[in-house]
Image (tube, grey):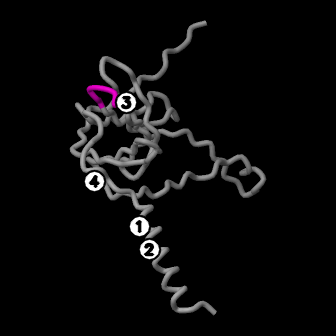
């Protein structure tokens, strides 16, 4: 049987470990952000997919940090970088609209064998408004987080269908 003292120590350890694993937001951005916006897109062919691209324009590349991921509208993705005159970080979020559906429905379970498992999104550790995102970054081996607010939406990018090939 566990003593009361051991049970108390165990309970305190759980509380301390639980609190230390919570993500703490930094009070300011570690990079100079010029503009943050998102743009929805839809492929021009049936089943070609759709999504939201989140763009973060920075004046300069911060050498002491490495931006890693972005949390936006209940999802998280790794950030890509585009080197231009300035540095642009992009988070590409896929959506379900216009997604190719390769599902076989049959009374014979063997015919449904190749169906893919539904994608159940993981809950992100932040409560965000639709116009907010959180960026994770690495600095001196530590993972840190900062929030960007007032993200604007630019007009949708609707891609045309591919041109017909002539033989």
Left or right placement of residue 87 versus residue 100 in this view? left
Q: Nearer the viewer, mark 1 or mark 4?
A: 1
Distance from Cα at disc 2 to Cα at disc 4: 28 Å
Which region is colored magenta? 57-63
**Mark 1, secondary structure of its residue:** helix
Marks 3 and 4, the one that precedes in the sequence: 3
Where is residue 127? Give x, y as percent.
Answer: 33, 58
Q: Give the crowd class for mark 1: few <14, some 14-19, many >=20 residues within 10 Å.
A: few
Contact, CB < 8 Å: mark 2 with mark 1?
A: yes
Q: Which residue is mark 2?
A: 15
Residue 152 visible at all: yes
Q: Which residue is mark 1?
A: 19
The residue under label 3 is 63
| Residue at the image position 42 percent from the left and 56 percent from the top | 124
Please state the horizontal and vertical placement of residue 82, each as a whole percent of the image.
40, 24
Q: Which residue is mark 4?
A: 129
């Amino acid at each position: 049987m566990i003593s009361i003292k051991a049970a108390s120590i165990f309970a305190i350890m759980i509380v301390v470990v639980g609190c230390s694993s919570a993500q703490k937001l930094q009070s300011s951005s570690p990079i100079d952000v010029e503009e943050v916006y998102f743009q929805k897109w839809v492929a021009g062919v049936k089943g070609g997919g759709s999504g939201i691209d989140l763009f973060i324009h920075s004046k300069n590349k911060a050498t002491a940090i490495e931006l890693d991921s972005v949390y936006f509208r209940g999802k998280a993705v790794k950030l890509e970088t585009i080197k231009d005159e300035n540095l642009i970080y992009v988070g590409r979020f896929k959506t379900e609209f216009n997604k190719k559906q390769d599902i076989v429905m049959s009374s014979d379970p063997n015919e449904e064998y190749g169906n893919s498992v539904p994608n159940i999104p993981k809950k992100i550790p932040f409560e965000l408004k639709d116009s907010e995102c959180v960026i994770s970054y690495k600095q001196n081996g530590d993972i840190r987080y900062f929030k960007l607010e007032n993200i604007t939406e630019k007009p949708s990018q609707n891609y045309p269908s591919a041109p017909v090939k002539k033989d």
